[in-house]
Image (tube, rainbow, N blue to C red):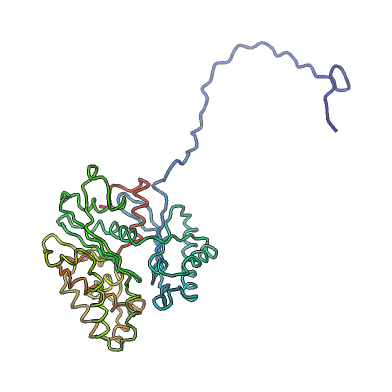
């Protein structure tokens, strides 16, 4: 039924409005304006960022905030999940390995929700690159945790590892080798800084987050001479030689085999022409930080003492020879190595020794940083909330 108002003087006559008395116009009063609500048009310097690295051996995450040119870590997580266990033999991620990884990722998801992180990159590396059932695993993670993992290419992994190490680059460095020893792969990047003014060299490394090539007229070029991703890390190399009973023989075989894989890396062919003057190696990995902690005699790990420490080839050899002298049982009991690292330390040491045979140096800088920090620096720099380089 429609409802209409009657016209004229029907049952509901229109009321006559009274005529208001004439008044003098009031003085115009200023309108009180409320401050306009802030419209968020882009990243805020107070925003939290996250970077998650699911590797062959570990699941690690950092939640951080930009603070000037540095990162202020708000929360972190690290757990050995051994995602790549058995991958060398089967080519697939095992059920138990995937379950361990999903368990760790659930903890990460809770931390991300707790801190209300909206800007994040969650990446997976070598184990997921190699596994034939990686798509099923990525779908499982999404279903169980709501997290969307991104499998990144080896070249981006290498690039981000380099970016994370920018603060450790000396202004005297002309030739730089950055080594990232992972669980399933090892990335090496050789960078020529000769054409970059000395004070600009660390910043030139930081600019690599824009890609290995950028406009030389805008910023001095840090030339990437060569890079390589060798599909051998501490876990995969260990698995290859698990059947060798003798501890010393197993170590020697691992080291020489790894060195053979360097043959296609052009700076390896020119190693005899490299001089110690102006040459720097930066090593980023659990292996390098563990060797540094052993060198310092730390019974409890201290990042502030390890990150940025410089070691010579001779000092590293002394630590590695000490590990060999301890044997498997002695290494298990050594508090400087730690329970999570003791089964993998010799394969990592074999890789490190092979590198130092090729490029002996008195300037190996230890970096307790890597892919996660590189991911954070790149995100923050892209959003314009980080000052020009972490210095």
Q: Does 194 appear above or below 132? A: above
Q: Is residue 303 visible?
A: no
Horizontal and vertical percent for residue 216? Answer: 23, 45
Residue at the extreme bottom: 245
Of 131 and 220, nearer the camera is: 131
337 left or right of 295 in image: right
Q: Relative to the observer, which residue lies in front, 157 or 273?
A: 273
Screen quadrant of the N terminus: top right
Tell me if residue 153 comes above or below residue 81 in the rendering.
Answer: above
302, 215: nearer the viewer: 215
Q: Residue at x 34, y 53 (%)?
A: 378
Percent x, y of residue 220: 21, 47
Q: Answer above or below: position of 384 versus 320.
A: above
Residue 21: quarter of image:
top right
209 with respect to 190 (left or right):
right
| Residue 358, image x, y percentages | 17, 70
Q: Percent from the top left, x then y, of residue 383? A: 38, 47
Q: Quadrant of residue 346?
A: bottom left
Residue 42 visible to an observer of this rendering: yes
């Amino acid at each position: 039924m429609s409802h209409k108002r009657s016209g004229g003087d029907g049952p509901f006559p229109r009321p006559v409005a009274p005529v208001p008395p004439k008044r003098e116009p009031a003085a115009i009063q200023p309108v009180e304006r409320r401050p306009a609500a802030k419209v968020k048009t882009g990243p805020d310097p107070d925003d939290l960022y996250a970077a998650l690295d699911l590797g062959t051996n570990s699941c690690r995450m950092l939640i951080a905030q930009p603070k000037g040119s540095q990162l202020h870590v708000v929360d972190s997580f690290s757990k050995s999940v051994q995602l790549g266990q058995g991958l060398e033999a089967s080519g697939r991620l095992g059920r138990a390995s995937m379950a361990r990884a999903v368990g760790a990722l659930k903890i990460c998801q809770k931390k991300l929700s707790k801190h209300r992180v909206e800007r994040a990159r969650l990446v997976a590396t070598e184990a997921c690159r190699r596994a034939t059932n990686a798509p099923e695993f990525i779908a499982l993670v999404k279903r169980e945790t709501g997290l969307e993992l991104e499998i990144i290419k080896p070249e981006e992994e290498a690039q981000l590892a380099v970016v994370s190490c920018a603060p450790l680059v000396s202004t005297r460095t002309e030739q730089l080798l950055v080594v990232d020893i992972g669980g399933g792969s090892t990335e090496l990047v050789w960078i020529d800084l000769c054409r970059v003014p000395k004070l600009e060299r660390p910043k030139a490394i930081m600019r690599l987050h824009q890609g290995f090539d950028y406009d030389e007229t805008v910023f001095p070029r840090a030339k990437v001479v060569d890079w390589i991703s060798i599909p051998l890390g501490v876990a995969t190399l260990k698995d290859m030689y698990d059947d060798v009973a003798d501890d010393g023989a197993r170590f020697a075989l691992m080291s020489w085999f790894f060195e053979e894989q360097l043959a296609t890396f052009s700076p390896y062919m020119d190693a005899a022409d490299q001089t110690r003057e102006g040459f720097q190696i930066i090593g980023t990995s659990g292996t390098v930080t563990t060797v540094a902690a052993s060198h310092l005699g730390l019974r409890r790990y201290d990042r502030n003492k390890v990150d940025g420490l410089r070691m010579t080839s001779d000092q590293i050899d002394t630590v590695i020879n000490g590990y060999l002298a301890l044997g498997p049982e002695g290494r298990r009991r050594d508090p400087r190595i730690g329970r999570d690292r003791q089964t993998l330390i010799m394969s990592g040491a074999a890789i490190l020794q092979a590198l130092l045979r090729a490029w002996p140096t008195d300037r190996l800088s230890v970096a307790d940083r890597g892919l996660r920090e590189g991911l954070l620096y790149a995100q923050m720099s892209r959003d314009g909330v980080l000052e020009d380089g972490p210095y």
